[in-house]
Amino acid sequence: MSDSIVVTGTFTDDSFAMDVAQFLGVRGDISDEVSLKTYANSEFCPRYISDIEDLERVGRYLEGKVVIICSVSLSDRSRNDCAMRNMILARAAKDNGAKRVVLVEPDLFYSAQDRGAYRFGEIEKDRDILDLKKFDGQAFTSLLYAKLLKEAGVDTVITVHNHSIKVENLFRDIFEGDFHNLIPAEIYAHYIKTSDFVQTGKDGDNLIIVSPDKGAAPFGHRVLDALSLSECKRVILDKKRTGEREVSMALNPASEVDIGYLTGKDVIILDDMVRTGSTIVQCCEYLKMSANPRRVCFGVTHFYSSHEAREKLNSPFIDEIMTTNTLPDILNRDCQGRLRRKMVVLKLGQWIARYVLRMFDMDYSYMSKQFYMVDMSSKNPRWPPPSFSK
């Protein structure tokens, strides 16, 4: 398997790409597979490295091979730069005979820009003219990005927990179904059940899964299903914006229990992303003040480690934060700041590699027990991370 796969990142020192390559069993470093050079005029010009003595396969070195491009954004590298590198790497792979190009982009670029002009009638049929007017004049960037990736030579796109149904539908259409939106419900469920993050109680009778709004409810339901704890209950909140970054909270009637049921229990609020932390802090404060649960934790897939988010999430209303490394900056202790005391990061490289092995009908049984890694600062009172013996 490893001989037929080439793994690269958009930069040579991409630790996320290195993780995926390692778990796929790919030998050698990224710099042994592709030269990610940039000309003096700042133009990116990668070159997949072939045998300099081989004059028989010029332009065909990658025939029969699968090229996997791992693309993550970091604070010192713009998404615009990474996106262009994706397309040039894909084009170089296809121009040199690659059988298949797979883009692994855990936090899909431009997918938040999923609103287009009024002329995209069929795509935007669910939205009225006043709603569309808010975005009048901007590009339908998610649609453009999907089309550019396809034109560049990308055959398959793998991402993690993209919340936009519209983006998912348009990517599936453009990539003829070869778009894979991986939801890390099994990872969260496994960690919740096998660590001391919370106390689940008997069959989950001490645990509450909370969705901060109706949009996050499907993810909460998937985690609840993966937990398989018959007594674990669900709560859905409604948020109402009272200002640009101010919200108020109330219990949604679809919740399985009333707010008083949370008293003395452990609560996990689950969402797809956090940028400023305003909503989550308000949600945690509402739960703490209304019901006095024993523990209130926050689980989020995409953590944007901004100064504002770090300051707000350091709130005393949040006991601990569980996230993933789809945005690898979060592994940096400086980017965690004071949150390192109450943060655990679940690393997804192994889980994504397992999915790729499944995709190519290869053996992944050796990952049956351990399929993700845990990163935690020694400043966290729960340090060290648990083993996978359970």
Image: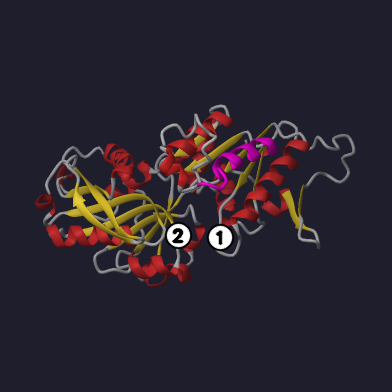
* Image x and y of residue 72, in percent: 56, 53
Q: Is residue 340 left or right of residue 5?
A: left
Residue 378 visible to an observer of this rendering: no
- Residue flagged by tag 2: what amino acid is it? Tyr
Residues at discs 1 and 2 in contact (Cβ within 8 Å):
no
Vertical comparison of 382 with 101: above or below: below
Query: What is the x, y in percent for residue 225?
Result: 28, 36
Q: Where is residue 152 in the image (x, y as percent from the top left)?
A: 69, 39
* Residue at the spot 83% in from the left edge and 37% down from the top edge: 59
* Residue stretch in magenta: 136-153
Q: Would residue 73 be found to the left or right of residue 32 on screen?
A: left
Mark identifier at residue 304 = 2
Is residue 225 left or right of 32 when viewed as pictured? left
The kind of residue tagged 1 is Leu
Can you say which quadrant of the picture contains the N terminus? top right
Q: What element carries label 2?
A: loop
Q: Which residue is drawn at 43% across and 39% down?
A: 129
| Classed neighbour count for the residue bearing mark 1: other residues with Cα under 10 Å, few (<14), some (14–19), many (≥20) | some
Q: Main secondary structure of the magenta part?
A: helix
Gap between marks 1 and 2, in whole Å?
10 Å
Question: Which residue in the structure is indicated by mark 1?
Answer: 74
Q: Vertical placement of 64 versus 69: above or below? A: above
State the SS at label 1.
loop
Judged left or right of residue 185, residue 268 is left
Binning the other alpha carbons within 10 Å of mark 2 as few (below 14), some (14 to 19) or many (20 upward) gives many
Membership of 151 in magenta stretch = yes
